[in-house]
Image: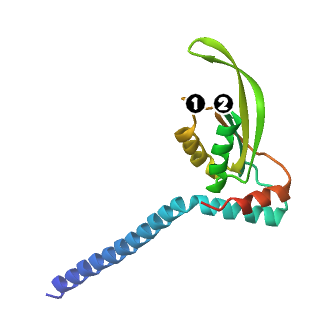
Amino acid sequence: MTFVATSRMEWLFQRCHKEVFFSGFRSVLLMSCLLLVLSVSMYPGLWSIGVQLHSAFTGSYAPGHHSLLLINSPNELAAKDIGRVIMERRLAASINILARTSTMYYWKGEIQDASEVLMLVKTKTSRIQQVMDFVRSVHPYANPEVLSFLVEDGSLAYMKWMDEAIPDD
């Protein structure tokens, strides 16, 4: 009889030990998944904080945090209207409007020669998609030129000013 009781006790001990192990494992797995989801959802904000910390500690610029967008427009009025809304929405720190650029391009198999207005939009890299979506929604051209270039280096004071001018996502 003691043999049966001993083996039953061992069986209960092994079962309880497995349940404790697996419940602990499930908790760790759940916490890991939660941390991963939070990290991914907070990535833009964490990136911005990381860039600011990097700049503060090293006194240098973290390449790629800011971008320059080139956007063409048929005339100065359209460029100013588009630029004003971009600024009002705080999607850019600054916009230069360069009047009267001469442009040559292919359109429907033909070489076109036109006069356009070029906008230089200075923004955070994290805002590029919002700027592009807005420009495509209001631009008079069917296929507006919107090109982005990462800023690799520049005046640290100017970059800090851009960070202050454009709120975080």
**Quarter of the figure with residue 142:** top right
Residue extending farthest top: 110
User: Where is mark 2, residue-wise?
Assistant: 74
Report whether 123 appears left or right of 157: left
Instruction: State the colouring used for the structure image.
Output: rainbow
Q: Is residue 89 or residue 146 the one in the foreground?
A: 89
Q: Secondary structure at mark 1?
A: loop
Q: Is residue 124 above or below residue 120?
A: below
Label 1: how many Cα within 10 Å (few below 14, some 14–19, many 20+): few
Residue at numbered disc 1: 141
Q: Earlier in the sequence, mark 2 or mark 1?
A: 2
Residue at the front extreme, as displayed: 77
Quadrant in the picture for residue 152: top right
Q: Position of residue 124 (x, y in %)?
A: 68, 52
Q: Which mark is residue 158?
A: none
> In which quadrant of the rendered image does the C terminus lie?
bottom right
Picture residue at 72% right of the left edge, 50% below the top: 66
User: Considering only vertical position in the picture, is 134 above or below 142?
Assistant: below
User: Number of callouts in the render?
Assistant: 2
- Residue 152 located left or right of residue 143: right
Query: For the residue marked with disc 2, what is the amino acid?
Result: Pro
Q: What is the C-alpha distance between the residues marked 2 and 1?
A: 8 Å
Nearest the camera: 37 or 158? 158
Residue 162 image offset from top left, x and y in percent: 75, 57
Residue visible at 16% across and 82% down in the picture? 4
Q: Residue at x 68, y 65 (%)?
A: 49
